[in-house]
Image (cartoon, helix red, strand yellow):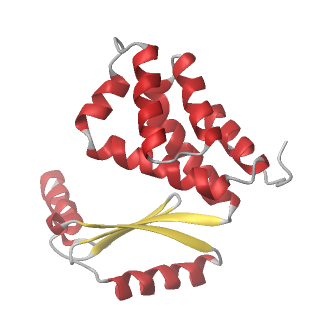
Amino acid sequence: MSKNKISVTSNNSYAQALFELASEGNALTEIEKQANSILVLIKNSEDFSYLIKNPTTRSEDLIKVMEMISEKNNHNELLKRFISFIIKKRRFFYVEKIFKDFLEVCSKSRGEINAKLIAAKELNGEEITKVKNELAENFGSNIKLNYKHDPSLIGGLVLKVGSTMIDTSIKNKLQQIEKQMIEA
């Protein structure tokens, strides 16, 4: 077990195992960045996403593709072995969930709280930092803020911190008025 005795609950035993192995190998930060880069690749490449989720893709082919990607990106040896392991166990189609859960476990181990901010107005870096600092002060913890611009909100913003959601968007207010009119 890791020297880092943090109790983190995770529904994903693969993510927890990767976290423990990376902690023991003092490679947590490196593997966290590399897992995130693979998630970005999955998100940005339809072909790669299809390859992962296609049940007819042979394990040998997946291993070759991932070895090429790992070599090109200088991935940590532990991450390479972990990816090969989940491919051999026929669980690679879960890799996106495994890595998202892994990043969440890493975040929780640092005491960070995940927050999501969706704003109708395009916010600059200073405004995002101000929101992040305000949340950190209110919650007494580090905040990992994911920001997204969504003009369909018309005005206002939606903020989700843990299980708490605050929706001050005009879109939401219009939906509430519409619902009240239908019920009346």
Q: Position of residue 23 (x, y in %)?
A: 74, 50
Residue drawn where x is 68% and y is 64% of the image:
110
Where the N terminus falls, by quadrant? top right
Left or right, 50 with reference to 166: left
Residue drawn where x is 40% and y is 18% of the image:
61
Q: Position of residue 80 (x, y in %)?
A: 57, 35
Residue drawn where x is 68% and y is 53% of the image:
27
The quadrant where residue 180 appears: bottom left
Q: Position of residue 141 (x, y in %)?
A: 64, 74
Where the C terminus falls, by quadrant? bottom left
Left or right, 143 with reference to 181: right
The quadrant where residue 83 appears: top right
Q: Position of residue 2 (x, y in %)?
A: 83, 47
Q: Is residue 88 above or below residue 19?
A: above
In depth, the one of 173 and 154 nearer the eye is: 154
Q: Is residue 116 above or below residue 13?
A: below
In depth, the one of 123 and 60 nearer the eye is: 60
Left or right, 31 with reference to 39: right
Left or right, 138 with reference to 109: left
Residue drawn where x is 57% and y is 53% of the image:
32
In depth, the one of 48 and 125 nearer the eye is: 48
